[in-house]
Image (cartoon, rainbow, N blue to C red):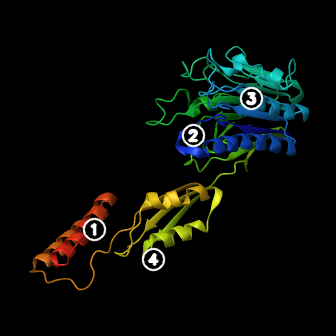
Amino acid sequence: MLRLLHTADVHLGARHADLGDQATAQRERQFAAFRASVDLAIAEKVDLFLVAGDLFDSNVQPRRSVERVAAELARLVDARIRSVLIPGTHDVYDRASLYRSNDIPAMSGAAGRDFVTVLTPERRSVRLQPLDLTVHSQVFATKRAPHSPLVAFDPREDPSTWQVGLIHGSISIPGQTEHDEVVITTEEIAASNLDYLALGHWHSSSRGKAGRTVYAYSGAPEPVALDQDRAGNVILVGLDLKDGKREVTIEERKVGRTVFEKLEIDAAGLASQPALIDQLATRADEDLVLDVRLIGVRPDVLDIREEEVEAALATRFLKIRVRDRSVPPLSEGPLPPEDTILGAFVRDVEAGIAELEAADDVAGAREARDVLRLGRLLLSGEEVTL
């Protein structure tokens, strides 16, 4: 049985402009996830380490970043684990490619050996004889592929027992992927005659099977954007022959630190904005992306400013987002008679709110509730400060 570790979309060196002061920390998290992937490969004694593109976020990287990657690959070399890498669409193999300006196999101590291989337009496959396995790919020298990388892709004449593909691109989804740089179809995957196809480009992990070919996206080992709650994993792949039958197994393993949580809080139970801040502070975690939604009917006295809550808790979390989706009460006290202006107003606006809610017009219903609350106060003769 052979064991592979499949990762992709590490995006080392990403700028994270949306994170401000936390950008540097998130870049280190991404490198830590790559190192954790190497740690896992060594601990599990895998035979092959695959990187399906976008190891780097761009081709503009300091030499130190490339050296850090080479040092991790050298750890795999020392453990007698082979690595095969391909450029992606961010670290594309164009004239400025860092894979052209840096000899990563040599930097990893694997010069002249098959322990670290970078597949390029000129080198579309590598046969790893000790593993009886060949890795195939189609890398382009432009970000947008001139055709599917699986066109004319047929490894049947290759003598290796195991055939593995390495592609950075999207599986075709009508209406969604027409503008992607590299697109393949499940029909092409089924016709590829591969045992396993390791995919990169989608940052959430997923898997499938087309024909006899098992394929999977490992997803980013650490989220590149803080809404990627299916990132954080790598994939362990098993290739086995049982009674002459091929068996491919895949297993997700977590290597990223970031944790995502969605939290709904009933606004009816909140006394004040400081009370909300205190409640959320009990969940403080520097690895947590917390998405908070206030729901339900809020008391008239409750005034929540989302940006103030986020600012007060910004240093307690990796990221916190607060959205107030609570609504004011429709009516308080008995309804005025229908033949009064106030009674007619309340009934008319409440009917409109019901229609908006039935049509899932959240924003419209919320605005109408505010109209009802303020209108009732004004028409009842109470002094209102706007």
Can you identify the residue that label 4 sits on?
Answer: 271
Q: Amino acid at mark 3?
A: Arg
Identify the image quadrant of residue 369.
Answer: bottom left
Depicted 182 relative to depicted 381: above or below:
above
Of badges 1 and 3, nearer the viewer stands: 3
Can you identify the residue that label 1 sits on?
Answer: 369
* Secondary structure category for the residue under label 3: helix
Q: Residue at the left extreme?
A: 339
Residue 219 visible in the snapshot: no
Q: Nearer the viewer, residue 383 or 181?
A: 383
* Secondary structure category for the residue under label 1: helix
* Secondary structure category for the residue under label 2: loop
* Secondary structure category for the residue under label 4: loop
Query: What is the CA distance from the residue labelled 2 to the residue labelled 1?
Result: 38 Å
Q: Amino acid at mark 1?
A: Arg
Of badges 2 and 1, nearer the viewer stands: 2
Answer with left or right where residue 178 lies relative to residue 111. Answer: left
Depicted 79 relative to depicted 367: above or below:
above
Q: Which mark is residue 64?
A: 3
Q: Amino acid at mark 2?
A: His
